[in-house]
Structure formats: structure tokens, C-alpha cells
Image (spheres, helix red, strand yellow):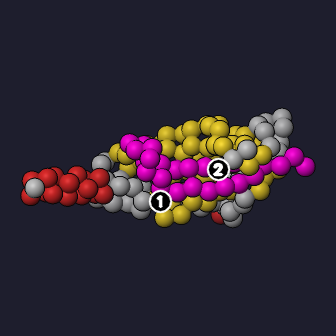
Amino acid sequence: MIRLTLFIFMLAFCVYSHAQTVSKLTITDNLAASSKFGYGKPKPAPAKDQFEMIEEKGTQVLFYADVTPSESLPEIYKLSFTAYKISSGKDEWVDERVLDLKKTSTYALTAVNFFNSGEYKIVITSGDNKDLILAEGNFSIHKN
């Protein structure tokens, strides 16, 4: 019994000790103007939840996640950004981006082009465990 309890404790500690943390998710369409000509950590433009459809090129949506660096993480770890279209209450997969991050990283940034209007959501998960949701957000794309 003691061995089983110790094993469960060690397993829980190992899972927790390598867990990534996303402290904030920003959904927007661009980087802040001050970031375009500077060095260092880029900053996202103000968050948006509604975007206008650009039919010729697709509508680009930028996903910016503030992550918490940790010495307990492996040197390189993965974050997965998965976009879903919400149709009739069901999530339909649209696109996925998997990013390699260093344990000292303070942000993750990726963009996806969408070609249809509708309601969407983005889900950030651990690259090692898709069941571990770190952040999620909803947005919509409308024709004007």
C-alpha cells in the first residue's frame, strides 16, 4: 500500500513538474506598432474577438501566449495551438501549429489563415499531452 501511494505521488509530481503554464492568451490580428521596429519581446496589438473576412488571402488571426518560464521544464518543450470551427455545437478541426519552446521562453506566437466566416476557437495544449488544456479562446470571422 505504501509503495502504491509513493508511486502515485511520484507520478503526480513528475507530471506537475514538467507542466507548462500559459498565463495569458491574446487573440488579435497584428503585433503592436511599437514592436515592429524594436528589439526584444514582441507585444501583441489589443485583443479582438471579431475579425473581418478577407476572401482573396484569407483572414489572418494571430495567437500570442504569455508563458511562464521554469527550470523544471525540459530544455525544449512543445505547445500545440489547435484551431476549431464551431458548427452546430461541434468542434471541427481547422488547423494546428506545434511550436518548440525553450524552458526560458516567455511567449509563444503563431498565426493561422482562415478562409470561411463563422465561429472559431483556439485551444493551446501541451505538445506531450493533448488532454492538458493550458488556454483557450473564442473568436468570430464575419463577411462585411
| Residue depicted at 13% across the width and 57% down the height | 6
Q: Is residue 40 visible?
A: no
Q: Secondary structure at mark 2?
A: strand
Q: Name the residue beneath numbered marker 2.
A: 121
| Label total for image | 2
Asked if 93 appears above or below 31 in the picture, the reply is above
Q: Is residue 23 left or right of residue 89?
A: left
Relative depth, front residue between 5 and 120: 5
The amino acid pointed to by label 1 is Val
Q: Is residue 26 left or right of residue 104?
A: right
Q: Quadrant of the N terminus?
A: bottom left
Asked whether 26 falls inside the magenta stretch, the response is no
Asked whether 138 falls inside the magenta stretch, the response is yes
Extreme residue in the front direction: 1
Q: Secondary structure at mark 1?
A: strand
Extreme residue in the left direction: 2
Q: Quadrant of residue 2?
A: bottom left
Q: Name the residue beneath numbered marker 1.
A: 22
Asked if the residue under mark 1 is in contact with the one under mark 2, i.e. CB atoms within 8 Å, the reply is no
Q: Position of residue 66 (x, y in %)?
A: 50, 61
- Circle 2 packing at 10 Å, graded few (<14), some (14-19), many (20+), is some
| Residue depicted at 65% across the width and 38% down the height | 92
The amino acid pointed to by label 2 is Lys
Q: Which residues are magenta?
A: 120-144
Q: Is residue 75 visible?
A: yes
| Residue depicted at 68% across the width and 62% down the height | 47
Q: Position of residue 90 (x, y in %)?
A: 66, 43
Relative depth, front residue between 65 and 84: 84
Q: Nearer the viewer, mark 2 or mark 1?
A: 2
Q: Position of residue 122 (x, y in %)?
A: 61, 49
